[in-house]
Image (cartoon, rainbow, N blue to C red):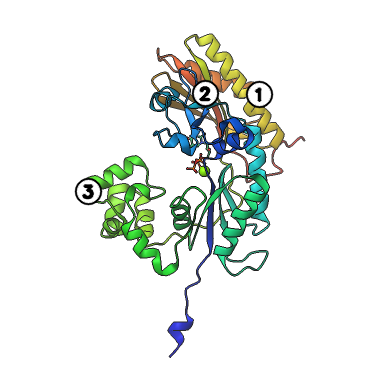
């Protein structure tokens, strides 16, 4: 007697926080003339894209990643504003400092969002809901910006919850609500299920969480590969991924989108050298080096290719990196004009500190 009651599962308290219309809200905050107006942050050139839009612009259907020309057509009064990344980064540091005053288990996903595990927290506050409310309040006090928060027992649920009532929302999914919530959730709203997978799921009759739950794990693995296991788990409300405060960097890259498409191979080569220089500077600064060089090319039709080569040794000098990147470029035989070039390095020597430059 009483045993079953005592054996309560060890539930975690996870918060996901995401700033509302982040870049656009910052621009509206800092320029009175933009307040209450439909604005888009991003370039207005022929090939510009919208990075984000104010809520006033979203009413017209303007969205992130939309070509600026389309956005201007949907919303003729739309005001385009250039991004100010240094300001966004500084605000990002401010909000992360607030998060870390509650817990060290903070996993940022981008400048404006993070997961927090507050099961144990520095202020010994029992209620995760109270912490989420306090954090939202502190963010507003310090930055005059609003954020939305989701509170639940794992990352998947907290993330979906934070998106549920935007802007300035606070949504909670309590343990006894988890299964009902997931059952009725549309597959397209599942974080981690992309557009392509969602379409595939629709084809086999999966439209909601409860549809997903009807497929057993093996069936989902057969249909969707190894991610099938994760889909199976979340359909039952299970997501054991820990909040990981120091995501290990697996690659470093630098890329440029050109105002005018490049057609001259000599110019492309010069750009690749510049990018390689940037990557090398980063590696030198952090004393992290890698063995695999990747060249990324996006053509003017937005099709993208990557080409990689792995060197037998760590690449720790600029000449080797430059050589390899240039070789990758000259091996691409494609007449299409080039819109974007990127150079990246992976296979980093993160696990072997001290073996970096052994000067004997
Ligand atoms: P999001 O959090 O996805 O969007 P948001 O904060 O603008 O709006 P929401 O209220 O829906 O959260 O992204 C954060 C910032 O990242 C966004 O303000 C601009 C930038 N961003 C891009 O540059 N390109 C993109 O495609 C997306 C989605 C975001
Ligand atoms: Mg956001």
Residue at image point 45% right, 52% down: 165
Please report contact status of discs 3 and 1: CB closer than 8 Å, yes or no: no
> Is 252 located above or below residue 340 in the figure?
below
Residue at image point 39% right, 25% down: 70
Measured in 3D between alpha carbons, the distance from the residue under mark 2 to the one under mark 3, in whole angstroms, is 40 Å
Q: Is residue 289 left or right of residue 152?
A: right
Dividing the picture into quarters, in which one does residue 358 lie? top right
Q: Quadrant of the N terminus?
A: bottom left
Residue at image point 60% right, 45% down: 145
Please tell me whether mark 3 sits on a helix, a strand or a loop. Answer: loop
Mark 3 and mark 1 lie on one chain; the one further toward the N terminus is 3
- Closer to the camera, 337 or 180? 180
Which label was assigned to residue 204? 3
Mark 2 and mark 1 lie on one chain; the one further toward the N terminus is 2
Label 1 sits on residue: 318
- Closer to the camera, 112 or 70? 70
- Closer to the camera, 246 or 205? 205
Which label was assigned to residue 43? 2
């Amino acid at each position: 007697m009483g045993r079953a009651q005592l054996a309560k599962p060890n539930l975690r308290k996870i918060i996901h926080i995401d700033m509302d219309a982040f870049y656009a809200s910052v621009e509206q905050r800092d320029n009175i003339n933009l307040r209450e107006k439909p604005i888009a942050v991003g370039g207005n050139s022929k090939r510009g894209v919208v990075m984000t839009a104010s809520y006033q612009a979203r009413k017209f259907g303007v969205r992130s990643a939309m070509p600026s020309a389309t956005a201007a057509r949907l919303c003729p009064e739309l005001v385009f504003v250039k991004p100010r990344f240094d300001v966004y980064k500084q605000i990002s540091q401010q909000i992360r400092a607030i998060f870390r005053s509650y817990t060290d288990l903070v996993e940022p996903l981008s400048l404006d969002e993070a997961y927090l595990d507050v099961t144990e927290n520095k202020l010994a506050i029992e209620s995760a809901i109270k912490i989420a409310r306090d954090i939202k309040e502190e963010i507003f006090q310090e930055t005059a910006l609003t954020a939305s928060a989701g509170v639940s027992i794992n990352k998947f649920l907290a993330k979906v919850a934070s998106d549920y009532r935007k802007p300035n929302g606070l949504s909670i999914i309590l343990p006894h609500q988890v299964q009902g919530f997931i059952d009725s959730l549309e597959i397209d709203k599942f974080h981690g299920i992309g557009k392509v997978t969602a379409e595939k799921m629709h084809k086999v009759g999966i439209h909601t969480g409860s549809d997903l739950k009807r497929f057993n794990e093996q069936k989902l693995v057969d249909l969707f590969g190894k991610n099938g296991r994760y889909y199976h788990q979340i359909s039952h409300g299970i997501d054991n991924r820990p909040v990981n405060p120091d995501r290990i960097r697996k690659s470093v890259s630098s890329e440029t989108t050109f105002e005018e498409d490049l057609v001259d191979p000599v110019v492309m080569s010069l750009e690749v050298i510049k990018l390689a220089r940037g990557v090398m500077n980063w590696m030198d600064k952090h004393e992290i080096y890698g063995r695999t060089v990747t060249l990324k090319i996006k053509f003017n039709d937005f099709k993208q290719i990557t080409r990689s080569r792995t060197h037998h040794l760590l690449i720790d000098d600029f000449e080797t990196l430059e050589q390899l990147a240039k070789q990758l470029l000259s091996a691409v035989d494609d007449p299409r004009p080039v819109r974007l070039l990127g150079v990246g390095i992976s296979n980093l020597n993160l696990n072997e500190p001290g073996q970096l430059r052994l000067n004997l």
